[in-house]
Image (cartoon, rainbow, N blue to C red):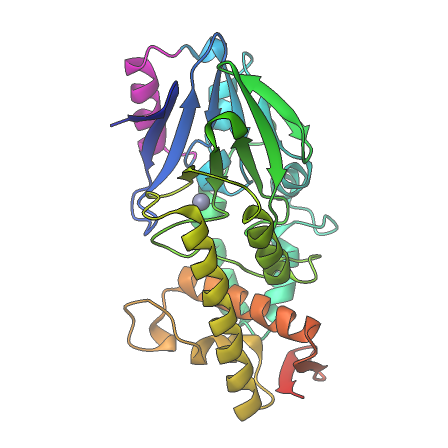
């Protein structure tokens, strides 16, 4: 159920039923006050598993605080409920503003679902598919309830738990304000979804973020500067040395960028939605039309992120048609 990965640091794999991610790794740092890093979705299966593990470990919620690597529901989902009145939840300042924006979900707020919908519609995503998505997106269904004892943290801020110094490291890309937590004494880093090992972290375009993939690759190069011997990812296991994985991820994105650029060159005028349908995906689906809707949304979001990076490099141009939909062509 749980496993010690370093002195006083325990990994609890919280199951994510039906998700290809399988589980979210929740990490516990034991001390007079404990720190729990990431939590799983706000749903019964995650709650039961995590609470049973904490009970078995003799952890009192009255003596526990939380650190959330990013605002995705599979990480922040249970934090507010577990913290109750007794704990605080550290989360990057940018992530907190995104989290609050979903909770308000108002049209004028920078992070609301409506702004995502507007951007996806501009990139050719059919409106009726976006409406259907509203009803089945786990990020929306299993999001935490409103409010919570959140405390924003900044890049470089130091937290102290379990006799360790933990440094907040801003690593944007997977989300606009994603943070890793660095424990230099053990050459250990809690990676969240910045680096995963047997799956590739999803990098999508975000409303209000000019070039998420550019940010992500820069954060990967930033992470290359650290000597990390114990990399602790947010999902699954670390199957190879961190540096090896970072190098593979950088190559992966260069290859994908070259593929996207070539497709647009050969078929000028594509929307990002159409481009996504022509890129290669590791998914068992016969055709683009049969892609499950949620997977399609992420695929288009990724195609958009690739297009944004190619625009930043000056490799593509974007043109808006009379309906406000964007079309791309090579230079
Ligand atoms: Zn995740």
Q: Position of residue 25 (x, y in %)?
A: 38, 35
* Residue appearing at x 60%, y 27% in the figure: 90
Quadrant where the C terminus lies?
bottom right
Judge from the rendering whether residue 212 lies leftward or rightward of residue 54; answer left or right. right
Q: Position of residue 39 (x, y in %)?
A: 43, 31
* Residue appearing at x 72%, y 84% in the figure: 322
Q: Nearer the viewer, residue 289 or 191?
A: 191
Can residue 49 be found in the magenta stretch? yes
Judge from the rendering whether residue 115 lies leftward or rightward of residue 304; answer left or right. right
Q: Position of residue 148 (x, y in %)?
A: 59, 25
Judge from the rendering whether residue 190 lies leftward or rightward of residue 159; answer left or right. left
Q: Position of residue 98 (x, y in %)?
A: 64, 43
Dominant SS in magenta: helix
Q: Is residue 82 visible?
A: yes
Classify 186 as above or below 207: above
- Where on the picture, by quarter, is residue 24? top left
- Where on the picture, by quarter, is residue 127? bottom right
Quadrant where the N terminus lies?
top left
Magenta stretch: give its range.
42-59
Classify 161 as above or below 76: above
Q: Nearer the viewer, residue 301 or 139?
A: 301
Q: Nearer the viewer, residue 62 or 249?
A: 249
């Amino acid at each position: 159920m749980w496993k010690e990965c370093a002195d006083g640091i325990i990994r609890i794999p919280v199951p994510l039923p039906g998700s290809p991610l399988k589980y979210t790794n929740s990490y516990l740092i034991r001390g007079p006050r404990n720190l729990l890093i990431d939590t799983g979705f706000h749903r019964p299966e995650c709650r039961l598993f995590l609470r049973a593990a904490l009970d078995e470990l003799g952890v009192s919620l009255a003596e526990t605080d939380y650190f959330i690597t990013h605002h995705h529901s599979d990480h922040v989902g249970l934090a507010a409920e577990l913290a109750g009145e007794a704990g605080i939840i550290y989360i990057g300042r940018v992530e907190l503003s995104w989290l609050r924006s979903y909770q308000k979900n108002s049209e004028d707020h920078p992070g609301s679902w409506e702004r995502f919908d507007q951007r996806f519609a501009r990139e050719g995503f059919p409106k009726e598919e976006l409406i259907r998505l509203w009803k089945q997106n786990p990020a929306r269904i299993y999001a935490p309830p409103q409010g919570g004892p959140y405390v924003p943290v900044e890049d470089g801020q130091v937290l102290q738990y379990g006799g360790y110094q933990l440094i907040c490291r801003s690593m944007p890309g997977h989300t606009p304000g994603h943070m890793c937590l660095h424990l230099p004494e053990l050459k250990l880093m809690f990676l969240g979804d910045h680096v995963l090992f047997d799956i590739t972290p999803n990098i999508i375009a975000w409303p209000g973020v000019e070039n998420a993939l550019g940010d992500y690759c820069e954060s990967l190069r930033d992470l290359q500067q650290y000597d990390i011997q114990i990399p602790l990812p947010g999902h699954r296991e670390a199957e190879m040395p961190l540096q090896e994985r970072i190098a593979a991820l950088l190559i992966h994105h260069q290859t994908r960028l070259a593929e996207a650029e070539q497709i647009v060159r050969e078929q000028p005028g594509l929307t990002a939605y159409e481009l996504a349908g022509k890129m290669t995906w590791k998914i068992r689906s016969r055709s683009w039309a049969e892609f499950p809707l949620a997977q399609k949304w992420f695929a288009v979001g990724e195609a958009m992120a690739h297009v944004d990076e190619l625009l930043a490099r000056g490799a593509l141009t974007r043109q808006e048609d009379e309906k406000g939909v964007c079309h791309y062509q090579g230079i």
